[in-house]
Amino acid sequence: MAFWSVREELSLVNRLRRSYYELLRDDMDQFMLDYALVQSYQRFLKSGTQYPFVEKRELKPRARIPSIEHEDQNAFLVVFVEDSIPVRYKKYIRFFNLNRTTKSNLLQIKALPLPDSFDRNQKYIESAHFYDFLRLLLPVDYALLIQRDPGSHLKNRYLLSHFHVRIDWPIAEAAEDMAQTLRYISKDLYEKGDEYADTAQKKFFEYYGVPVMVGGRRTAAIVAAQYLKRIPCISTVYVGSSESRALIRISERGVSKSVLMPLTEDEMQQLASANNMALPTLKKNYVVARESQKSICIFQVSYAYTNHARPPDDGKLREINPDVNWLTVGQEHILTKPGVIKYPPLPVGIIYS
């Protein structure tokens, strides 16, 4: 059962909001792909460091990622909510007057190069300078919160409302919440013993496509994604870390990862032929960089949930089996360069090739 309503169940005014949110999210996707992948790649080039491409095996469900921190990789956490987060949720998603995006609050951050010409309207998504403002704040630690302006009742205005947002819900509670929903426990995480609780927590990480006990940002991202299921609207969490070298996106559609992938000339030719596209057209619209005879493209994998990661049809309690996969590779695509609007993602089969 979905925690959010599909379009057909919404009032006309909320359908309009959903359409507007999805439109804004399409733009946000493009910006985040560019910031997480293309701009990171450029930072590696500038520092004269070889870019550490993600290997195919790292994209398989339950894969282990080499735990190496790459300081040139842009790391961030952004939470983008369709509605406004109710005040009662501040206990675990920490957004207060102290970390609202007001000029006086922002000036407290010494590391933030806030321009003298700062206009408070820049924090609204419709502002021409919104993405400049977002880019300025992304390196600031913790999460950024973008939500519907609770003060604009008549108009769906979205703004970057808070910075330095901490996600303070315990992992054990997030895992308990997931395990209850999937009917692996009835009430308490420890009702079937410590070992069972430990398995449930490991499965919580697998459910969101990240290795167990990953770094702070990715853990905060998956805990936030689980917590936001309490709000009856859709939300999107974007996270990038210096270890994963990927843009991880968690939404009502599930989990996807986007990475930079080098393709040989033969692979490019095959891709062009399979999609009835001229090779120069493919290179112009899908290649973000060239490196030693290879074309670097953005590859995205979307994961699908197995039956073990969905609530059972009969609603009955069941046992966790730690050995079965909860995620499978769903769809794989080569994406256009950020900003290209005329061409679609191209289906490919790379991970198991």
Image (tube, rainbow, N blue to C red):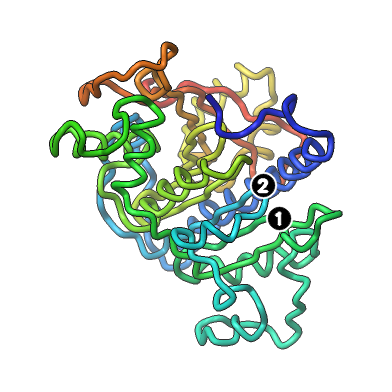
Horizontal relation, residue 318 to residue 297: left or right: left
Q: Which residue is mark 2?
A: 82
* Residue at image location 33% in from the left, 40% down from the top: 175
Circle 1 residue:
148
For mark 1, give the secondary structure: strand
Closest to the observer, 282 or 95: 95
Q: Marks 1 and 2: in contact by CB < 8 Å?
A: yes
In this rendering, is residue 188 above or below 37? above
The residue at 40%/38% (across/down) is 208
Above or below: residue 23 compared with residue 44? above
Residue 115 placement, left or right of 198: right
Between 345 and 43, which is closer to the camera in this rendering?
Answer: 345
Residue 254 spot, x, y in % from top left: 50, 33
Q: Quadrant of residue 185?
A: top left
Image quarter of residue 53: top left
Helix, strand or loop at disc 2?
Answer: loop
Q: Which residue: 37% across, 21% down?
A: 352
Q: Position of residue 339 (x, y in %)?
A: 71, 47
- Label 2: how many residues lie within 10 Å, few (<14), some (14-19) or many (20+)? many
Neighbour class for label 1 at 10 Å: few (<14), some, many (≥20)?
A: many
Q: Residue 140 or 224: which is nearer the viewer?
A: 224
Work out which residue is located at the far top of the displayed protein and give it: 314
The kind of residue on which mark 2 rests is Glu
Say what amino acid the circle numbered 1 marks: Arg
Q: CA distance from mark 2 to mark 1?
A: 6 Å
Comparing 335 with 45, the one in front is: 335
Q: Quadrant of the C terminus?
A: top left
- Count of numbered labels shown in the rendering: 2
Q: Residue at x 69, y 25 (%)?
A: 278
State left or right for residue 194 relative to residue 230.
Answer: left
